[in-house]
Image: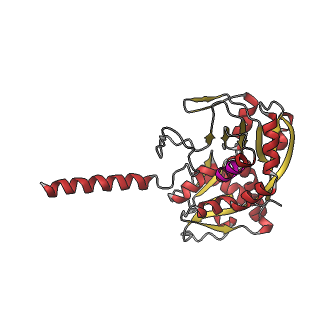
Amino acid sequence: MKKILFAGIMLLLAGTVSAQQNYQYDPPWNQPPAAGVNFTVPGVDNVPDLYGDITDPQLVIFFAGNQFMCLDSLLAAFKKAYPKYQRIFVETLPPGILAEQIKKGSLTMGNLHITTQPDVYAAGKTRMTEMTPYMSYTAPYAYNQLSLMVYKGNPKNIQGLTDLRQSGIRISMPNPAWEGIGRQIETAYQKAGGEVLQQAIMQAKTKDSTTYLTRIHHRESPMRILYQQSDVAPVWSSEVYYQKMLGHPVEEVVIPEKENIRATYMIGQLKKAPHPAAAKDFIKFIQSAEGKRIYKMYGFQTE
């Protein structure tokens, strides 16, 4: 009887470990805010790109998603510098989605309908230029460049962008329709291998499904590499840096300067910002020495 009971317990434990391993790299990767009840279920209910206090916020920020890793440190430091702002709500969805949300006034995610209006919008320079009619002012605050993320050990021995053309290489590629990085990566393809490389990756390999187009690359691409569903992912360098900070088994393949691009991050206050004073204070903070220190800590460039 004892042997049967022991075997049953071991089987249950094995099933629990297996279930945990199925989602061992899943977000949220930020520290969840304190709450009376914390109900986060990996792979089912985790909502990693909605962050903070959605009820009566004192500041609402729409960040281009690839900056999500800065939030814990950035918001803690901002609240310390400006203690009158404690209820902050942040979205870190792709910049194109956030732009549409600003234009149309709301967003539905699953069964959740969000009508909260942003005070601050942060995105790449090109996207911010497109949003000029909605902004009262904008300013640069950080910079980034591209890298290739691969699984630890680089199993496919990927050395550069031109290797992505090979038929056996599975790519996790941001969809240029929604993500500014997608357009930047296409420019890098053109630099590295011209129209031939760009079309091979974006057309031929998309057609045969060896190029997977993401909707939220800062979440999908790392997970596809970690779960070995893709062999390589063009990402911002800061994203490889952060996954390595977490101790996840990824490596970086550096893209040479001549094939790379430099992205400029812009931040601005919305003309219809519900909390204009808070917006001004946050923008001032993110441009401060402390704001820049935090961005550098997560692999971004600030000059």
Between residue 22 and residue 253, name the one nearer to us: 22
| Highlighted range, magenta | 71-77
Classify residue 40 as left or right of residue 72: left
> Residue reaching furthest left?
1
251 lies left or right of 183: left
Give the percent coordinates (x, y) of residue 69: 65, 53
The residue drawn where x is 32% and y is 53% is 15
The x and y percentages for residue 224 are 55, 55
Asked if one can make out residue 219 in the rendered structure from this viewpoint, the answer is yes
Q: Is residue 44 above or below residue 157?
A: above
**Does 72 lie within the magenta span?**
yes
Measured along the vertical axis of the image, is residue 163 above or below residue 130?
A: below
Q: Residue at x 47, y 46 (%)?
A: 42
Can residue 127 be seen in this snapshot?
no
Q: Main secondary structure of the magenta part?
A: helix
Seen at 74% across and 33% down, the residue is 102
Q: Position of residue 153 (x, y in %)?
A: 54, 71
